Structures are given as C-alpha cells and as structure tokens.
Amino acid sequence: MIRIAVVVVSLLIGALPARAQDRIGVVASFSILGDFVRNVGGDRVAVATLVGPSGDAHVYTPSPRDAKQVADARLLVVNGLGLEGWLPRLVQSSGGKATIVTATKGIKTLDADDGDSHDHGKAAGKHDHGDEHTDPHAWQSVLNAKIYVANIRDALIAADPAGEAVYRANAEAYLGKLDALDREVRDQAAKIPAASRKVISSHDAFGYFADAYGIAFIAPQGVSTESEVSARDVARIITQIRTSKIPAVFLENISDPRLIQRIAAETGAKIGGTLYSDSLTAENGDAPTYIDMVRHNIRTLTSALAH
Ligand SMILES: [Zn+2]
C-alpha cells in the first residue's frame, strides 16, 4: 500500500514539471505578437511577452527578468522594421540561443514618409536611415496580420515538428477569424463619408490601416514615439485641421493625451475616443486581444465620423 502511494506521488511529481518543460518556450517582443503566438501555439507553447499591456514597444527598458526569459526561450518573435531598437542589446546580453522569428517577413512595407504627415524636410536629399525610413506598424492592416500569423505558424512547426497538425489547425481557424475581421473593418469604413476620412492621432501608427482601409491619419509625432514633437509640428497639424476641416482627433493608449487635448481645444475638433495602436490592454480593458483591438478602433472611428 505504502509502495503504491510512493509510486503515485512520484509519478505526479514527475509528470507536472515534465509537461511544463515540454512546452515550447516562446518570447514575444510585445503584446500583439504574444496574442498571435497564443492563438497559433495553443497549449503546446508557453508564451511570455516583453512589452506588456499598454506598454510602448518603441521605447522600452528591458528588465533582468526579460533577459532571463530571452535566455530560456526556444523562439523569440519580433516585429522588426526598426520597432524594437532596444532588442539587439537584450538578445546579446541574454546569451540565449533562441531562434529569432521576424513576424513581418514578406510584408510589403510602407515608407515612414508616406502620406501627408512628414512631407516637410523630404527635399533634403537621400539619407541612409535604414529602418528609420520604414513604418514598423504593419499589424494595423488585418491582411498583414495574416502574414504575421503564417510566419509564426511556420516557425513553430520548424521548432516543434511533432505539433505540426495542431499549429496548422490553430492557424487555419485564426486566419479565418482574421478574414472575417478584415471584412468587418471594410464594411464599417464604408459607412464613413469621403469628406470625413481624415483624422488626427498622436503618432504615425496607422499608415498601414490608412493604406488598407482608406482613412487618412495625420500625426504630430513621427512613426516612433522616440521623436520629439516640435512647436512647428503642432502648428502644422492645427493648420491642417482648419484647412482640411478635419472633424475629429483621437487619443492613443500608449501616448500622453495632453498634446491631442491641446490640439482639440485650439481647433474645436472633437476628441473621437482612444485608439489602440501599438499595444493591447489588460484582460479587463477595451482591447485584450488583437481582434478586440481592431474592432474597437474601427468602431471608435465610425461612431465619431459616420453621420
Ligand atoms: Zn508606434
């Protein structure tokens, strides 16, 4: 009897940690990528996210805990395109052997200078800005998000071939949801009259959204929240709101609201709500998942602009 009990206890003790260890350790650089990995990886992966809910992935100071997580990971999923400037140093200092998966691989990128917002200073000639010239916010187009998901699926299969069928089935189901989401955004956007399809946000995070869904965004701050907003940038936005009769300005979850509040007060443009650009929220917020985020954003835009 005692021997049986000992065997059972040791089986239990043995089974639990072994299971946890069998999971594929994946670190995602920020919350949106973490959500994609969870959807594709399901129970076979253990996902950790470096820049958590409502964090800013442009400017981030990794903690010792982050370094430990990266050191222990099998896969490190990143956006690339210059978003996570703080990451190479973290990877180097962690000394880990994680395979780095660039989730934007194969995406047709947009130039950071595309659109109306940064036409000033363009005549300065050719610069070698590298990634600074690329807009990193590719996830804001749902069709691009499908490419992220396919890249993550392929990387998980390569790291864990035994899980191939699971990863393929999970990805297939999630890609179907993204197709439906893309249609939903197009249907909602179609309700906004052509004359109202121009809005103001804090930083240039919606270039891919604008390109995909036909709503133009103008922002006082460039594609990275690292850049300073000058008085000239603000004056330019205020002039544009007046001359283009832009009806609404939007706050962002990762940015200080005061700049947009000031622009609204000075121009009389209404504050249309908060958009989620670079980060999901905690579970009890408006955007705990990518699908919730995109749905919240298009509904906020439509309710402010479609009349
Ligand atoms: Zn951003």
Image: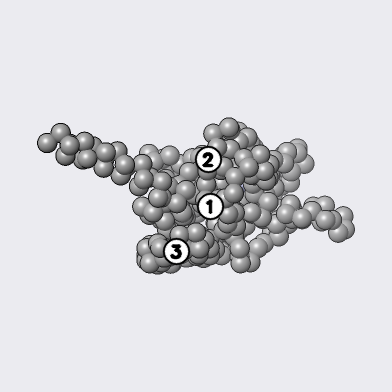
Q: Nearer the viewer, mark 1 or mark 3?
A: 3
Left or right, residue 119 beside residue 53: right
Determine the CA span between mark 1 and mark 3.
14 Å
Which residue corresponds to the image point at 79% horizontal and 53% vertical from the top-left? Answer: 129
**Could you tell which of marks 2 and 3 lies nearer the N-terminus?**
2
**Mark 3 nearby-residue class (10 Å; few <14, some 14–19, many ≥20):** few
Pick whichever of labels 1 and 3 is earlier in the sequence: 1
Using the rendered view, name the quadrant where residue 211 is placed.
Answer: bottom right
- Spatial CA span between label 2 and label 1: 11 Å
Residue 37 rendering spot, x and y as whole percentages: 46, 54
Q: Decide: marks 2, 3 in contact (CB < 8 A)?
A: no
Binning the other alpha carbons within 10 Å of mark 1 as few (below 14), some (14 to 19) or many (20 upward) gives many
The quadrant of the picture occupied by the N terminus is top left
Label 3 amino acid? Answer: Pro
Amino acid on which the number 2 mark rests in the picture: Gln
Q: What residue is pinned by disc 3?
A: 161
Is residue 261 among what the camera can see? no
Residue picked out by circle 2:
69
Q: What element carries label 2?
A: helix
Give the color scheme: rainbow, by chain, secondary structure or one colour: one colour
> For mark 1, what is the residue?
75
Q: What residue type is labelled 1?
A: Leu
Query: For numbered disc 1, what is the local secondary structure?
Result: strand
